[in-house]
Amino acid sequence: MFIYGLRTVVLTDHQPLTALFNRSNVSARILRWSLELQRYNLEIKFVEGKTNVVADALSRGTAQRTGVESMEGLDEVVVNCIRKDKKSKWLTELESDDDFAEIVDALNKGDTSGRVTWPGAVKPVQIADFVLEDGDLKMYQANGSLVYVVPKSSRYEIFHEAHSGTFAGHFSAHKLLNRLRKEVFWPTMVRDIHKWTRECQRCFAHNVRPRMTPPLKPIVTMKPYEIVGVDVLELGMTTSGNRYAVTIIDHFSKFAAAYPVPDKSAETIAKTIFIRWIAEGCRWPKVVMSDKGAEFENRVMEELTRITKIDHVTTKGYNPR
């Protein structure tokens, strides 16, 4: 209420807050906070913690003074503590990296308004999505968490430890990416993880690879009953004493029929095909196609197809397609 409509400078020792209005990958909750604060004319500036004495005094209770009646017997000890974030080995390497040197330089200057385009990237990244914290370069995730930016020299080491380390399980690239994205980041992460996972010799030797299956070839027919397929299906015992069903289909019209039978002997199957399907239905096929079951490959079927001049062909063994 008191600052509405007025330009207000906010001083904070929490550097990530300076990029609150410039970040691109933010969660829905942080986005709502940002939109709420945009009602005010705020300019957020970073100050070092040792100079932010006003906020520290307001956020910390004053310690009660205890009187000392005598200094006799007390040893005087002087403790000096200067807190300074030490630059990590990763950050030192990233300062000379072609992809991140510009980002680190901009963050050191406090400029988070720019963008950087990496080779092969679909769109540029916001410098505001990165922050220098605890001597490392980190990147914001959509949920507001921070992940470490990894230089080129340590990327394969990170992958190897997660994929082949003592507590690793040689997981797939997809599972490995889901795990590593919660902790680290580098621009070519997806491509590198897939490449290194494919090159793992242990995975190649032990993983079951899918068999190459040739595509199916359609059966071409030019007229009805040129080719009919026949098979036997076991359905279980019915109240009528039938246990099987003889199924017959015309490959041209897709007309199908099923005949219940008590057994699948050669005589029963032959009667069903030649009497019920051919004679009663007046459907004379040119070719009868079946599998290599004993109910189809027998002397009865051989003689009947020879007499009626119907060709009997069978599919490949153990190939029910």
Image (cartoon, rainbow, N blue to C red):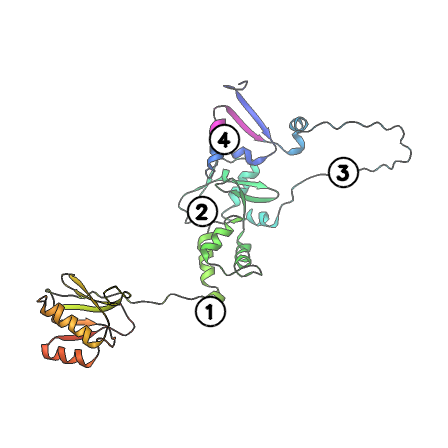
Which of the two discs, 3 and 4, labels the residue nearer the N terminus?
4
Determine which residue is flagged by label 1.
Answer: 205
In the rendered structure, which segment of residues is drawn in magenta? 34-45
Which of the two discs, 1 and 4, labels the residue nearer the N terminus?
4
Determine which residue is flagged by label 2.
Answer: 118
Q: Say what amino acid the circle numbered 4 marks.
A: Trp
Q: Give the percent coordinates (x, y) of residue 27.
A: 47, 38
Which of the two discs, 1 and 2, labels the residue nearer the N terminus?
2
Q: Say what amino acid the circle numbered 1 marks.
A: Ala
Determine which residue is flagged by label 3.
Answer: 80
Report the mark closest to the observer, 1 or 2.
1
Which of the two discs, 2 and 3, labels the residue nearer the N terminus?
3
Query: Looking at the image, is 62 positioned above or below residue 138?
Result: above
Q: Which label was assigned to residue 33?
A: 4
Q: CA distance from mark 1 to mark 4?
A: 52 Å
Q: Residue furthest right?
A: 72
Task: Please tell me which residue lies in front, 296 or 130.
Answer: 296
